Image (spheres, rainbow, N blue to C red):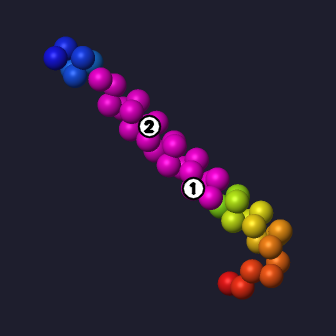
């Protein structure tokens, strides 16, 4: 039970936010690369 008290919630939430931002950035980068490579793609 003592381990529940010592959990670093701020660090956990910062990690979740950073991973979310990294995922969004990676999605946008892949989207830009796809638009440059696949010119036949209709938007």
* Magenta residues, dominant SS class: helix
Work out whether 4 lies above or below 33: above
Q: Tell me residue 19's x, y (percent).
A: 52, 43
Near-viewer residue (38 or 9)? 38
State the mark number for residue 42: none
Q: Quadrant of the N terminus?
A: top left
Q: Quadrant of residue 7?
A: top left
Q: Which residue is mark 2?
A: 14
Residue at image coords 64%, 53%: 26
Residue at image coords 41%, 30%: 11
Describe the element under mark 2 as helix, strand or loop. Answer: helix
How many marks are shown on the rendered structure?
Answer: 2
Work out whether 40 lies above or below 25: below
Residue farthest to the left? Answer: 1
Q: Earlier in the sequence, mark 1 or mark 2?
A: 2
Q: Is residue 39 left or right of residue 17?
A: right
Q: Which residue is mark 1?
A: 24
Q: Are marks 1 and 2 in contact (CB under 8 Å)?
A: no
Residue at image coords 21%, 20%: 5
Q: CA–CA distance between discs 1 and 2? A: 15 Å
Q: Quadrant of residue 31?
A: bottom right
Comparing marks 1 and 2, which lies closer to the viewer? 1
Residue farthest to the bottom? Answer: 42
Q: Report crowding for label 1: few under 14, some 14 to 19, many 20 or more residues within 10 A (C-alpha).
A: few
Residue at image coords 82%, 69%: 36
Work out whether 16 lies above or below 39: above
Near-viewer residue (8 or 4)? 4
Report the span colored magenta: 7-27
Near-viewer residue (18 or 36)? 36
* Residue 14 within the magenta-colored segment of the rendering: yes
Q: Quadrant of residue 13?
A: top left
Q: Tell me residue 37's x, y (percent).
A: 83, 68
């Amino acid at each position: 039970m003592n381990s529940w008290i010592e959990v670093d919630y701020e660090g956990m939430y910062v990690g979740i936010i950073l991973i979310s931002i990294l995922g969004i950035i990676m999605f946008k980068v892949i989207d830009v690369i796809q638009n440059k490579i696949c010119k036949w793609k209709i938007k």
